[in-house]
Image (cartoon, coloured by chain):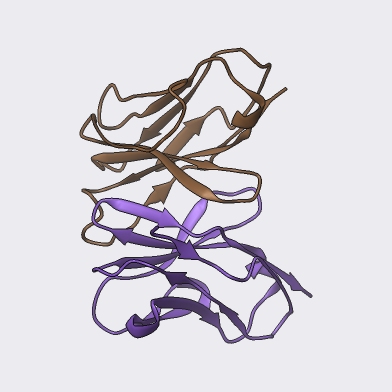
Amino acid sequence: AQSVSQHNHHVILSEAASLELGCNYSYGGTVNLFWYVQYPGQHLQLLLKYFSGDPLVKGIKGFEAEFIKSKFSFNLRKPSVQWSDTAEYFCAVQTGNQFYFGTGTSLTVIP
Amino acid sequence: DTAVSQTPKYLVTQMGNDKSIKCEQNLGHDTMYWYKQDSKKFLKIMFSYNNKELIINETVPNRFSPKSPDKAHLNLHINSLELGDSAVYFCASSQGTLRDGRGYTFGSGTRLTVV
């Protein structure tokens, strides 16, 4: 079955620590890839996306993600997190007209 | 100016009731969606409409019925509410069928609590 996996369910970091959230998917064809963020009590917002070109994409708020096709991965990174990055992070994969979300990773940043 | 707006933001109701959640987008997008986010934060697509035509209908109970009077609106009606329907429901919109990779614009969600 097609799936999107986020292995880290809950991550706790101190401010200024580096962040990497894993995302793996199981589709073999052409995909578009996304990371969304959901701050407490707010709606989902697009952080960044990849659909072609440079596999290292930069998004808002200092986030970046790298698409590694051979590993079916699209990991999210940030070199130095802030308390305001505390949120839920969702990886999503689009294939054709279907859109699949991972189960999310809850990030807590401790001041 | 809100791009995708859902009403109500919170909805508490008793089992067995019928309720509706409304969604409107002012982005000129032609595709709208309903997603359900359960207590474990897992997002699952329920329905998708493109130009008022249903194009995705995942396996959801037939107590859930989407209605799209025009391409700017996609309402969700739920009959005979059950405890398991408690969740946050997100409306979203996009232009086209996402082949250009633009992603979604989400509403702020409707937290439904069935008691």
Query: Is residue B25 placed above or below B99 in the rendered structure?
Result: above
Q: Is residue B1 visible?
A: no
What x and y, as percent, mark residue B92?
Answer: 40, 43
Residue found at the far front of this picture: A1
Query: Is residue A66 placed above or below A97 in the rendered structure?
Result: below
User: Which residue is drawn at the image coordinates 62% and 13% (left, top)?
Assistant: B16
Q: Colour of chain B?
A: brown
Q: Is residue B103 visible?
A: yes
- Which of A32/B30 is in front? A32
Q: Colour of chain A?
A: purple
User: Which residue is drawn at the image coordinates 63% and 31% (left, top)?
Assistant: B84
Instruction: Kindly indicate the quadrant of the structure image that contains residue A32.
Output: bottom left
Query: Is residue A35 placed above or below B14 in the rendered structure?
Result: below
- Which of A88/A10 is in front? A10
Q: In this view, does A99 lie to the left or right of B91?
A: left
What x and y, as percent, mark residue B101?
Answer: 27, 62
Instruction: Kindly indicate the quadrant of the structure image that contains residue B14.
Output: top right
Q: How many marks?
A: 0
